[in-house]
Each structure stands twice: as structure tokens, then as C-alpha cells.
Image: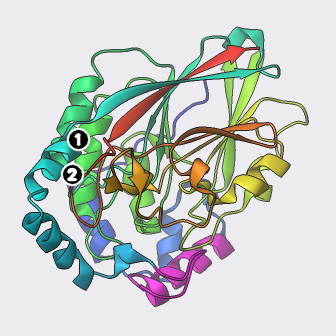
Amino acid sequence: MARSPALAKGSMSQQMEDMEKEPATKEALLMFPEGRLGRLHALQRLGIEAEHEAQAFGQGLNFFHIENWYSVHSVIRSVLWSAGLYRRGRRNAHDVQLRHNHIRSRRLPSAFDGFSILQISDMHADMSQCAMQRVIELLTCFHYDICVLTGDFRGKTFGPFAGALEGVEQVRVHLQGPVYGVLGNHDTIRMVPALEAMGIHMLLNECVVIERGEARIHLAGIDDAHFFRVDNIEKAGDPIPQGAFAVLLSHTPEVYRQAAHAEFDLMLSGHTHGGQICLPGGIPITLDSNLPRRLGAGAWTYQGMAGYTSVGAGSSIVAVRLNCPPEITLHHLECA
């Protein structure tokens, strides 16, 4: 197995406080371990956060970002209350389910037949506490080889993030084996040192090798491609040998074309919440994404690449779900 980063010194709570107090300056770049982030990537991410954080119109792959239009959140609550759906939606948001997804590939080394990947996406841990407690309950019921967290740890898209980190840490202590993660459009890059201090190996347009005996597969992860647009599939995928089995973690599935043409075998994403508030039959009102609707939830394929879009474990905007139950997903890799 690939090694996780070393834990940072000092208490977690103190580090969280320091992260929030520190301004997003060039000096903050010194906090990132081993220079992995890259000076230009860090400057770009911090600059976009400072200028466009919480921007509702413009910026990103789609023009309108409902998660940043905070005046509409109370309207949604009021409409649900009036329709008698709010309390049921709150209960639904707490009922996280375990789903299974099987991926068959001719390129998968035989040593990895049966290898399992637990995916937890869109935790929004500071506004989905009951859902996170349900996730912790589920984690005692099954085995997996590695865990991947596909972004959106925070509830809001700006402001304090200590509460989100505390919620993530409560789940992290119950996770087994190596844990890898990527950032989402709700996350600030200033969260990365604290996440890595928990033992979560954040992939910042990077790739790691996972080994079983002499066999290897590759796990790459990119920074947010939806809002901040600081993803770099080329950098993440360049170290992967041609013909090797490779998995890409991307918070949003909107880069499915680029991932397929870069010859990834599997892409794991989240972001869409499957619509979160859906019509009967699970028909989403909006996916907040620029992609075909068939890629908005669950398993899909594109140009020979397998994909999976998690509907997420937490909820955002308003912590309710209708006709779209939250999930964590256990992916089973199988040799074709």
C-alpha cells in the first residue's frame, strides 16, 4: 500500500484555529508539506478563493451557483414547510445508505481482483452531523481496502471551517486502512494541512501507487474543476505508465471527457448530490453541473471508462433530501 503522510505536530484543535486565523498570503504556502502543492497552483487557488468565494453568478463551469445564493435558502425551507415536506426531508437526510458498485476491467491486475474502495463524498460535515453519525454506524459493518473522500467537507462555500474539520475527524477515526481525498468547490485549500494531519492523503493534482505484492494500480486525484477550476489531469496522470490500471478522483464528474481521453479506467466523483431534492422517481430538479443527466448519479460509462457519481453522504444549502437518499459506496474491482 502507498504510505499516508506523516501526522503534523501539535493538537488538532489548535491547528484548526491557526488555519482559520492565518491570512491567505504567499507565506501560507510554506505550510504545505514537501512542496507537493506547487507555488503557482497555491497562488492560483488562494487568489481565486479571495476574489470569487461565495460568488453566485459567473466563475466556474456553469454560470449560476445556487449554493452561493444564500438568500434563496430560506425560500426553499419555507416552500418545503408549506408543502409539509420539511420534516420528512430532514429525516431522509439522516438515513445514509450503503451501496455497492462492481467494476470489471481487463486491465486490472489479477492480484487486485476483489479489491474494494470505500467512497464517501460531499460530507458537508458541519451541517450534516446526524448523517455523519449514521456513516460512523455503517462503517462497523463491512471491510474495504482503501477509502477515498471526494470533496466538499464544508457546508458553506466560504467562512469558518473548523466545524467541518471536527466533523471530518470524527468520521476519520473510524476509517481503516489508507485514506485519500480531493478538495471540492465548498473547500478552501487552507484545510489541507489539517486534513493531512488526520492521516488523509490529499491528492492535489497528484498520483500515488497502490501495491499488492508485485502488482500495482494507480490512484490520481485533482483539485476542484467545477468552481475554482484548478484541476490538472495532465499533471496528475503523467506519471502513470501506458496500459496501467488507473483510478481518478475528481470532486465533479464534469471532466469526464478529459478523464476518458487520458485513459483512466475508473473515475469516482460526487458534487451533484443526485439533485438532493428530486421529483418522484428520483428525477433531479437540478444537478448544478454541466454534464449529461445520465452521469448525475450512480454508475455510468463513457468511451470505455467506468464512472460513478455519488449522491453524497451529507446535504448542502438545506439539510433535506427528497427521493434521493444519501449514500456511501463500496466499489468492488473485478478482473474481466
Q: The N terminus is located in which quarter?
A: top right
Residue sitting at x 67%, y 15%: 334
In the rendered structure, which segment of residues is drawn in magenta? 39-64
Q: Amino acid at mark 2?
A: Ser
Picture disc at residue 224: none
Residue sitting at x 79%, y 47%: 260
Q: In which quarter of the view is residue 275 placed?
A: bottom left
Q: Amino acid at mark 1?
A: Met
Marks 1 & 2, CB-CB < 8 Å contact: yes
Q: In which quarter of the view is residue 13 placed?
A: bottom left
Picture disc at residue 128: 2
**Vertical order, 302 against 333 (above or below):** below
Residue sitting at x 30%, y 49%: 314
Q: Residues within 10 Å of mark 1 (few under 14, many from 20)?
A: many
Label 1 to label 2, Cα distance in Å?
Answer: 6 Å
Q: Would you say 317 lies left or right of 221 here?
A: left
Q: Residues within 10 Å of mark 2 (few under 14, many from 20)?
A: many
Element type at mark 1: helix
Closer-to-camera residue (321/119): 321
In the rendered image, residue 57 lying in the magenta stretch gets the answer: yes
Q: Residue 139: where, in percent of width, then height?
A: 30, 24
Residue 12 visible in this rendered orientation of the protein: no
Q: Residue 95: where, in percent of width, then height?
A: 21, 36
Closer-to-camera residue (201/115): 115
In the rendered image, residue 161 lying in the magenta stretch gets the answer: no
